[in-house]
Amino acid sequence: MSHADSTPTSLRQRDPDVAAWLQREDRRQASTLTLIASENHCSAAVREACSSRITDKYAEGYPSRRYYGGCEVADGLEDLARQRALRLFAGAEEANVQPHCGTTANLAALLALAGPNGRIVGMALKAGGHLSHGHDKSHTGMVFQARQYGVDAQGRIDLDEVRKVVLEHQPKVLIAGGSSYSRTIDYPAFAAIAKEVGALLLADIAHPAGLMAAGVVPSPVGIADVVTMTTHKTLRGPRGGMILCTKAVAKAIHSSVFPGAQGGPLVQQIAGKAVAFGEALQPEFRAYQQRVLDNARHLAACLQERGLDIVTGGTDNHIVLVDLRRTDVTGAEVEERALAAGLAVNKNAIPGDPRPPMVTSGLRLGTPAVTTRGFGKEQIATVADVIAGLVQRQDPDRFRPVVQGLCEAFPLP
Ligand code: DSN
């Protein structure tokens, strides 16, 4: 028998340490309700594609223009993913499915559109934006001349302020989108502001991409010059990024992703994206996204009934941002207590937060993952009871059985 034949092939036999950690993660996810707005549970088919042998393949370049031989399968998968992406986001002219993540997608897109040291304007992280929209700790705040806009006292984007910042700064790129903004963004208004100064509009839809693909909330596709996103949040695909754009900027975008920002694409992730886009083209996906939205609205209403404040008073998407300032607990404390009860949530700055980012006065909740498990309004109301109890400093152990019961009744896909 050859050496290769006798080598154990299963991960458990070959590397019990790593296998044990991964098993532990399986158990953690199964016994935890994920209410982190940026997380979801992708299908077994997506996971199978991502763990396929094509992880071995180098495919620098683009389909039919690779720097390596043997890329015919990589070409087929990338073409399929791009075609499905363009069907899913009708109105987009070009798709690039290679970005490894949302931040890479944003950096590549901004370098393509603004160039090094170019001027950009985006929403401040503390107002609900994202690090990669020009925050000074992000390369986007170092490589570009960035200015930021905030939100008004109610937590909503103030288009007059956006216009004022844009007129003053004269950016090459205006960014619309965020990571903890729960209200509809007026993309036509953003496009009009960008047009006034000859800027291009970049819409970052990392969070609501799935809701937009399903048509349950308004989309910037067909309005913005470039749309960036991640594929693993509401879109429920594998971890990764994607860029949609007009033909006018496509050449610059593609060469900014490769060779500009990345080397070989993660073809196994592209295969997973193709699977996820195929799933998202099915009618069930629209029904799922409608439930995500309905559940988020119900969660906001239930929390308000239980005396909690919600930033902006509600939500138009999958995010519910709880304002804890009128309570005597911080975001960090509730995050820790929730975990003890079996809920994964994240502390989050709220607009005008007086506390530092590792403490915060807010809690960001999201419904994509629990909706994938099958939650409806009744289960969402139970979750609201648990969160309200934790904010009132009730013992987390008291809630563990009810959370465990929900986990068992609504298993992972
Ligand atoms: N990690 C993403 C989120 O949680 O929204 C942002 O990068």
Image (cartoon, helix red, strand yellow):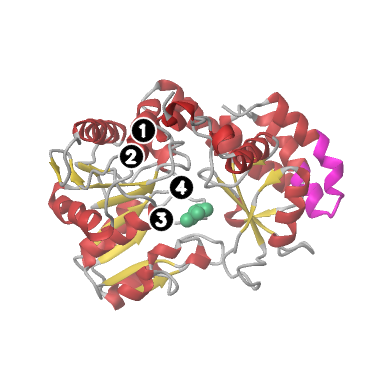
SS at mark 3 in the image: loop
Sequence-first disc among 1 and 4: 1
Relative vertical location of residue 234 with respect to residue 188 in this rendering, above or below = above
Amino acid type indicated by mark 2: Asp
Question: Label 2's element?
Answer: helix
User: In the figure, residue 122 lies in which quadrant?
Assistant: bottom left
- Is the N terminus in the top left, top right, bottom left or bottom right quadrant? top left
Task: Tell me the tag on residue 53.
Answer: 1
Q: Nearer the viewer, mark 3 or mark 1?
A: 1
Q: Is mark 4 within 8 Å of ligand 1?
A: yes
Residue that appears at 21% across and 62% down: 113
Q: Earlier in the sequence, mark 3 or mark 1?
A: 1
Q: Position of residue 235 (x, y in %)?
A: 43, 38
| Above or below 335: residue 55 | above
Q: Which is nearer the N-term, disc 4 or disc 2?
A: 2
Looking at the rendered structure, the secondary structure element under dot 1 is helix
Query: Which numbered disc flags the more N-terminal residue, 3 or 2?
Result: 2
Dot 1 alpha-carbon crowd within 10 angstroms: few under 14, some 14 to 19, many 20 or more: few
Residue pointed to by mark 4: 207
Please provide the residue range marked out in magenta. 386-401
Residue at horizontal 65 percent and vertical 27 percent from the top: 411
Q: Main secondary structure of the magenta part?
A: helix
Say which amino acid is labelled 4: His
In the image, the residue with mark 3 has its CB under 8 Å from the nearest atom of ligand 1: no
Q: What percent of the width, then of the height, locates residue 344?
A: 66, 46
Which of the 4 image quadrants contains residue 261? bottom left
Residue topped by disc 2:
56
Q: Tell me whether the residue at label 3 lies in contact with that at label 4, contact meaning CB atoms closer than 8 angstroms.
A: yes
Place of residue 260 in the rendered image (x, y in percent of width and height, measured from the top left): 22, 60
